Amino acid sequence: MREADELLTALPQWCVAPVPMVEPSGAIAFEWDLGPGRWLVFALKGTGTIEHSAMLGLGNELHGTRNFAGTLGRHEIALLSELMQPEA
């Protein structure tokens, strides 16, 4: 719960609010779904890591895990920024 609270606090002001959910593994996840082929999920398990799954347009699917110490890194900010950009 602490990591989930830290993630929400760390979101940039320009970011739309995510939908919270609990994954089958017990991870707390936050999802942004902006329509077909445009979504992002950050998941936290209380282990000091953040997992991401994203579809940033057809054929542009990304998955990964990074350290999480209460702030979002450049990679997570870049994913959010790319997702929030209007489609060309």
Image (cartoon, rainbow, N blue to C red):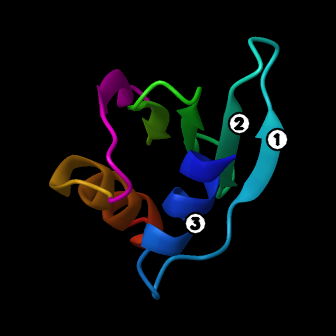
Q: Earlier in the sequence, mark 3 or mark 1?
A: 3
What residue do we see at 57% from left, 40% from top? 41
Q: Nearer the viewer, residue 28 or 63?
A: 28
Residue 55 on image: x %, y %: 48, 36
Q: Is residue 44 left or right of residue 58?
A: right
Q: Secondary structure at mark 2?
A: strand
Q: Is residue 67 above or below residue 24?
A: below
According to the image, label 1 marks what residue?
Answer: 21
Q: Nearer the viewer, residue 38 or 2?
A: 2
Q: Earlier in the sequence, mark 3 or mark 2?
A: 3
Q: Is residue 27 magenta?
A: no
- Amino acid type at circle 2 is Ile
Q: Residue furthest front?
A: 2
What residue do we see at 82% from left, 41% from top? 21
Residue 84 on image: x %, y %: 45, 69
According to the image, label 3 marks what residue?
Answer: 8
Q: Secondary structure at mark 3?
A: helix
Q: Is residue 69 magenta?
A: yes
In front: label 2 or label 1: 2
- Amino acid type at circle 3 is Leu
Q: Secondary structure at mark 1?
A: strand
Q: Is residue 27 above or below residue 69?
A: above
Marks 2,1: beta carbons within 8 A? yes
Q: Residue furthest top?
A: 25
Q: Nearer the viewer, residue 10 or 40?
A: 10
Q: Is residue 56 left or right of residue 26?
A: left
According to the image, label 2 marks what residue?
Answer: 28
Distance, label 3 to label 1, CA atoms, is 13 Å
* Stretch of the chain drawn in magenta: 58-71
In front: label 3 or label 1: 3
Distance, label 2 to label 1, CA atoms, is 6 Å
CA neighbours of label 1 inside 10 A, class few (<14), some (14 to 19), many (20+) = some
